[in-house]
Amino acid sequence: MSSLRIICILFGILSIVTFRAGPSLSRDSDSIPKYSVPPPPFSEGIFPCSECHADMETDPTRRELEEHTEIVEMFDHASDQRWCLDCHNPDDRDKLRLVSGKLISFEESYLLCGQCHGTIFRDWKAGVHGKRTGEWNGKKTYRLCVHCHNPHKPKFKPLTPLPPPVKPQDYQNLKLNNDEIPRNPIGKIQ
Ligand code: HEC
Ligand code: HEC
Ligand code: HEC
Ligand code: HEC
């Protein structure tokens, strides 16, 4: 084989590798798929935010608010370093805003959290952190971070430990009547 042919073949292989690598890299960079999630856990009547905010001036200064007072009071999420509009979008309040300026819907709030909690986000996608339900090899529903963590005060509150269950044999030995049998206390506990 002439050296010219070898060079041509090598060049061909090289260009295939380069052209294939190009697009797949750029696809990877924004390849976080959309996850199927239940509706975001808004308080009743608060969404769409634009119902009030559409005609309001945005005031980006840190201050006591006349509205959303309970959020300002509880705000404890690196709150010295930031304020509401680091997450909420000033111009269209029905959206959240990433650091890049990209707007996302409240169904995608995991992208917002994932900007700073990268390792947890990776675990969440893999189903190690948080909760997902559905088919093991098919469609899954992921709980949003905010289904378990309040975005304004996200530290998970300690859970009250429950008493151990009572075995049915023990009810019989104790000769308890129906009203005296201990019930599952979940629901009575705050
Ligand atoms: C770390 C990002 C972040 C910061 C900072 C933040 N928020 Fe939020 N906020 C969220 C996310 C995410 C939700 C959506 C929760 C959901 O999906 O139900 C939300 C929800 C809300 C809601 C709806 C609450 C409800 O009861 O349903 C209001 C109102 C709100 N934020 C106002 C504020 C105000 C005012 C501040 C500043 C004091 C603030 N937020 C700071 C991320 C943030
Ligand atoms: C019932 C009307 C109402 C609704 C609905 C409402 N807001 Fe507000 N919001 C206000 C008012 C009024 C203020 C200004 C309070 C002040 O200046 O003291 C405010 C202020 C804010 C601020 C502080 C920054 C600024 O622009 O002044 C944020 C952030 C905010 N709201 C987010 C939200 C989000 C997110 C939602 C929807 C999930 C929402 N609000 C829904 C009335 C509302
Ligand atoms: C801009 C970066 C940033 C974003 C965005 C962000 N966080 Fe945080 N988060 C922090 C920092 C910094 C701390 C530590 C704050 C502290 O110790 O006071 C923290 C603390 C937490 C904690 C408490 C960890 C502990 O100590 O137990 C949880 C849970 C949490 N964030 C969840 C979330 C969720 C859910 C979202 C999305 C709604 C989110 N974060 C978005 C920076 C961020
Ligand atoms: C099904 C509920 C659930 C969901 C969904 C969830 N978390 Fe958590 N998260 C927890 C619990 C429970 C803990 C552990 C609290 C503890 O050990 O004190 C925790 C702990 C954390 C901590 C502190 C971890 C540490 O190592 O200090 C961070 C940060 C956090 N979660 C962020 C997130 C983010 C970001 C998401 C979404 C991508 C998310 N969580 C989704 C329940 C959840």
Image (cartoon, grey):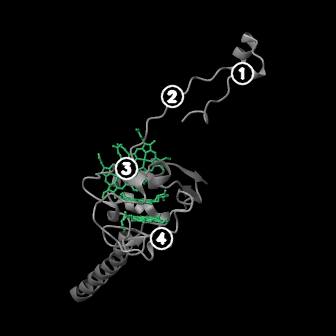
Secondary structure of the residue carrying numbered label 3: helix
Q: What's under tag 2, amino acid-wise?
A: Pro
Mark 3 to mark 1: distance in Å?
42 Å
Which residue is label 2 attached to?
A: 161
Label 2 vs 4, first from the N-terminus: 4
Marking on residue 52: 4
Number of numbered discs visible in the structure rendering = 4
Mark 2 to mark 1: distance in Å?
20 Å
Residue 103 occupies quadrant: bottom left
Mark 1 and mark 4 residues within 8 Å of each other at the beta carbon:
no
Label 3 vs 2, first from the N-terminus: 3
Q: Is mark 2 within 8 Å of ligand 4?
A: no
* Label 2 crowd (10 A; few <14 / some 14-19 / many >=20): few
Of residues 174 and 189, the one nearer the viewer is 189
Label 4 vs 3, first from the N-terminus: 4
Q: What's under tag 1, amino acid-wise?
A: Ile
Quarter placement of the N terminus: bottom left
Q: Is mark 4 within 8 Å of ligand 2?
A: yes
Where is residue 151? Give x, y as percent.
41, 54
Mark 1 to mark 4: distance in Å?
51 Å
Which residue is label 3 attached to?
A: 73
Q: What's under tag 3, amino acid-wise?
A: Glu
Q: Nearer the viewer, mark 1 or mark 4?
A: 4
Task: Please tell me whether residue 187 is drawn above or below residue 67 in the rendered image.
Answer: above
Residue 60 occupies quadrant: bottom left
Mark 3 and mark 2 residues within 8 Å of each other at the beta carbon:
no
Label 1 vs 4, first from the N-terminus: 4
Which residue is label 1 attached to?
A: 181
Label 2 vs 1, first from the N-terminus: 2
